[in-house]
Amino acid sequence: MQKKTGPRTPRITIREVASDAGVSVAAVSKVLRDAYGVSEALRAKVQASMEKLNYRPLASARGLRGRTYTIGLLLPDLRNPFFADIFDGVTSALARTQYQAMQGISVTASELVDAMIDRQMDGLILIGPNEMAERISEIAHRVPLVLIGHHEPGDESFDTVNNDDQLGARLVVRHLHANGYRRIAMISLARASTVVSQRELGYRLEMVDHGLGSDTLIIRSTQVLRDVQLAVRRLLESDNRPDAIFCWTDLIAIEAISVATELGVSIPHDVAIVGYDNTMYCDFAQHRLTSVDQSGELLGIQAARLLVERIEGRTAPEHFVVTPRIVARASSAKSSRTSKSGQDR
Amino acid sequence: MQKKTGPRTPRITIREVASDAGVSVAAVSKVLRDAYGVSEALRAKVQASMEKLNYRPLASARGLRGRTYTIGLLLPDLRNPFFADIFDGVTSALARTQYQAMQGISVTASELVDAMIDRQMDGLILIGPNEMAERISEIAHRVPLVLIGHHEPGDESFDTVNNDDQLGARLVVRHLHANGYRRIAMISLARASTVVSQRELGYRLEMVDHGLGSDTLIIRSTQVLRDVQLAVRRLLESDNRPDAIFCWTDLIAIEAISVATELGVSIPHDVAIVGYDNTMYCDFAQHRLTSVDQSGELLGIQAARLLVERIEGRTAPEHFVVTPRIVARASSAKSSRTSKSGQDR
DNA sequence: GCAAAAATGTAGAACGCTACACGTAGAACA
DNA sequence: TGTTCTACGTGTAGCGTTCTACATTTTTGC
């Protein structure tokens, strides 16, 4: 009969550090948290022992009394490269603190949020949550919370970090219009989200502002590759094909480029394509995708900062907003054709 | 003076469930872990109370005594879409169990591993770790461990899940050779890793097998976009430009396509490009990238299965290996030119 | 019908840490 | 000299679970 568990090396505890340093457990704890009332001499002794024994505090035990120094970052998925930018921001902001980020990945964040609260996360950052307002406020009452990509302040109990999605969408339409495009369609997300509806709103309003109200066309698709392809194909093969497609995120735009390429539809000659998020893929020569930059890294940095502030006691809500800017590339270069329905305002 | 923390709703504890159900705390715990010695009647009572009070066990407290039912998945980065496939596999395998996965993201997993052990993860899955063998075995002695993408069984204390990287690289060379390519270069990773060196080895051996030993050329680059671009540019602008480039991962291949496009080098006419991992981007019409499929999802599923087995007591190591297969697409279509240095074995 | 065995339930001691409540000693002040 | 502060340390009660040891009840075997 083998022993069930391998010979796991046992953990050094605070007690062993204390006895090694010849001080009380409480003293070691104070050093750890650098709490008030520790002499330099004691601190040095304790730190030497911690070093020597390679001591690391156990998060579970800390969690039972106070903080775990862990924050949870919830991402909707792992395929949209935009989230990598946000992640970089969060990481760099947290690097100087003693907090550690752990990621959870799930479109429907709800169960994962519970799981993270069960695991005593000191705070949570949610990206593009599709929870109803009520549920969000409930979460915020259980744990410090910052939302990235959520446009309903609604409650005093959490912070938000956003770019101005409505403006971003307006910029896209304005840019396309300036470059001679008129029949501008939008591919949006089937699942409801305040971000997406802001982008839809901006698109609509700006279309109307340019007298293109009757050309407004929003197609909603899930994120599933198949559905996106179908949506794009339907657009490109329709009788009155749009001369430009605004995709709510770069990933979709790249898929649109794929479908267009496949159908022999030339970009931007036959159809212009614009994305959102200005991810690394936009720059690739096979894409040259015009997109809206909202600096994911900045959003991440701000979110992390706000969350730490909240964990450490702030109660007044803050709402950080970035102004997006359009980054023009070849996928929406000036149209060579004369505009067909060009009643310009 | 405001109160420092908001009115956080307090947690329901096992004690409250016990008193609500009119049983002992120990009884509730038994139900929770479904341990031996619980009557149906008691179980029903307890479950009703748990439901009613919306009780959720606190992971920290559990961790202090036994399991946290959390496993850690460590990804090297968030930009390589291959990891999303692995993640999907892990998630789907874990869905039926009561374990929750939390992700950590870092090229140099080392500190993150410690952080996860501090947080009482029941087990860890490491992807493509660049730790030395010694460190890995040390980790394995502290926590159940499965490695994805690591070719040194070395120790009895952990499991591995791999595809046959050496074979995968051979398949690439074989395929390119069959399609008329001879001057095949490889872009590899600067940072050491057993996966990458297996791919290099396979490439070298197969080149030699085809009598192309003198055309063997390996360029090593970091993952930084800038470096990759430089490496590709140098290759494409060199006097004796290779007629095919094998990139160690799809992401690099896509960047290579970008550089080639930018330089006006046609694919596959002037140069063929092949990647590895067969990620979703390969299928896009702007890429049509030939790649090696190693089914990330399957790797993820197996890794999760092995880890759970290990957590639940298995001690004998297991090593799961997938046979890779090449997926040919347009980026390496048959060369139209006559082979120039074609001394075919 | 009675002993033994099996089934079911409970009490309570940890697990590793934090933080409150104190104790002590020296400095500052009157 | 006494008194009050301040700075520095320590003892110890939990935090919410798990799990061993034990008590009690029910079932089984003869």
Image (cartoon, coloured by chain):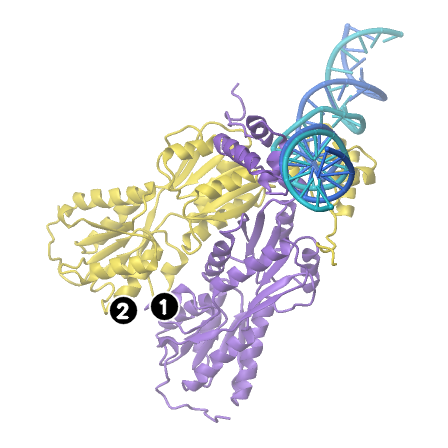
Chain colours: A yellow, B purple, C blue, D cyan
* A286 with respect to A217 (left or right): right
Amino acid type of the residue tagged 1 in the rendering: Asp
Which residue is rendered at x = 15% and y = 48% of the image? A212
Position of the N terminus of chain A, as image quadrant, is: bottom right
Taking depth in this image into account, of B138 and A169 the one nearest to the observer is B138
- The quarter holding residue A60 reads top right
Q: Where is residue C25 in the image (x, y as percent from the top left)?
A: 85, 21
Q: Which residue position holds label 1?
A: B283
* A31 with respect to A83 (left or right): right
Which of the chains bears the disc numbered 1? B
Amino acid type of the residue tagged 2 in the rendering: Glu
* B65 with respect to B292 (left or right): right
* A216 with respect to A277 (left or right): left
From what the image shows, is residue B340 above or below residue B154?
below
SS at badge 1: helix
Which of the chains bears the disc numbered 2? A
What whole-number distance in Å separates the C-alpha atoms at marks 1 and 2?
A: 11 Å
Position of the C terminus of chain A, as image quadrant, is: top left
From what the image shows, is residue A109 above or below residue A246?
above
Which label sits on residue B2?
none
From what the image shows, is residue B3 above or below residue B135?
above
Q: Which residue position holds label 2?
A: A262
From what the image shows, is residue A310 above or below residue B246?
above
Q: Where is residue B212 in the image (x, y as percent from the top left)?
A: 52, 87
